Image (cartoon, helix red, strand yellow):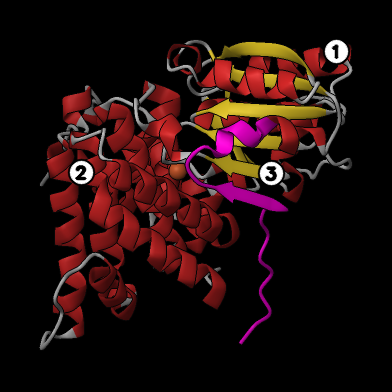
Amino acid sequence: MSVSLFLSPERILFGWGSVEKTGEETLRYGSKALLVSGKSSSRANGALTTVMSSLAASGIEATLFCEVESDPSVHTVTTGAALARQSGASVVVALGGGSPLDAAKAIALMATNPGQIGDYEKTMPTQPGLPVVAIPTTAGTGSEVTKFVVVTDTERKVKMLINSPYLIPRTALLDPQLTLSVPPAFTAGPGMDALTHAIEAYQSSLASPTTDVFALSAIKLIGANLVQATLNGGNISARTAMLLGQLHAGLAFGNASVALVHAMSRPLGAHFGISHGQANAILLPWVMQFNLPACPEKFVCIAEALGCNTAGLSLRQAGQLSVSRVREIYADTGLPLTLSELGIPATAIPTLAGDAFQSGSVLFNPRKPTLTEIEQLYHACLTGK
Ligand SMILES: [Fe+2]
């Protein structure tokens, strides 16, 4: 067995009311903070007020940067990093869904490193960033525990994946109560993203015994609770299970990486603005079907984690149940089932496939796809056949 390294935040706080510990946790890293959030949702649901009150109660001077858009751009990261330096912040508090968290992590890195965030797509940053206290308000990306950020280069129309251990937040603070008011579409999409993280990490060529434990736990928790959390948002136990599930998925894929689904979903976001979770949700069952012959025994474990009865079935039949169950969960959430419903034209497929084929995430897929096979997968996602 090869040696595996497992990276995670120094501190992970999980539980109802944990957001009230924001000030205390942040103070570990200094008394001047840059608070990074999205443009409206955290303000609307009261999370921003709660976080600011907690910071103030601990005597922390907070500068607000609430300009993060969906799919944060290089410009947003550059602007936020300049504000971090000007304000003398010694710590960044990240509040929101995947976009604000990714932006905050990138801002913290660029507050201490030269150049632009895009420079670190291919080279490693030389300095640790400012410490980050990350507080997710949706159950999906796992960004609060990972070494990845996705930043959009709007000129090149490319979603850049930046990967550095310096991007791992120092503290992750997860409070299920912050997710209670998330509307169905923003529950289902990120939830399918988290399920994709878990399944891709479990099948990844970088998977280890430690990441497998988290991946299977995530598949179990998300598989059993995503539909309930989507259709009945006030279900506290489903919301809590989803936040825990996406945390475990984040710990799994943060160390074992993602694979072909993510390679194919990023171009859909960059070229057509399709949300990350929605794109992954459509792609996931098709890519699972493609990967099934390469590692059927892993699909059997996925099927069992999803609650399927595999007794008496062949490896292939039992593995196939995992694909059917994922399709069923996805259909129950009510999200669009095909790329054509989202307005993607068939003429875009060569460009999408070309971008996906060049993605580093393909390297960790259990079955290495050809360019033609990626095109065929996009065609299947377009029509649902
Ligand atoms: Fe993702």
Q: Secondary structure at mark 3?
A: strand
Q: Quadrant of residue 77?
A: top right
Observer able to see residue 155: no
Identify the residue at image location x=26%, y=76%: 300
Q: Are marks 2 and 3 in contact (CB under 8 Å)?
A: no
Q: Residues within 10 Å of mark 2 (few under 14, many from 20)?
A: some
Q: Where residue 371 sits: x, y (%)? A: 38, 51
Marker disc for residue 228: 2
Observer able to see residue 335: yes
Q: Which residue is mark 1?
A: 87
- Against 151, residue 175 (above or below) is below
Give whichever of discs 3 and 1 has the lower sequence position.
1
Q: Secondary structure at mark 1?
A: helix
Identify the residue at image location x=66%, y=56%: 8
The magenta segment: 1-22
Q: Which residue is mark 3?
A: 171
Give the camera-side residue of 79 and 187: 187
Q: Is mark 1 within 8 Å of ligand 1?
A: no
Q: Amino acid at mark 2?
A: Gln
Q: CA distance from mark 2 to mark 3?
A: 29 Å
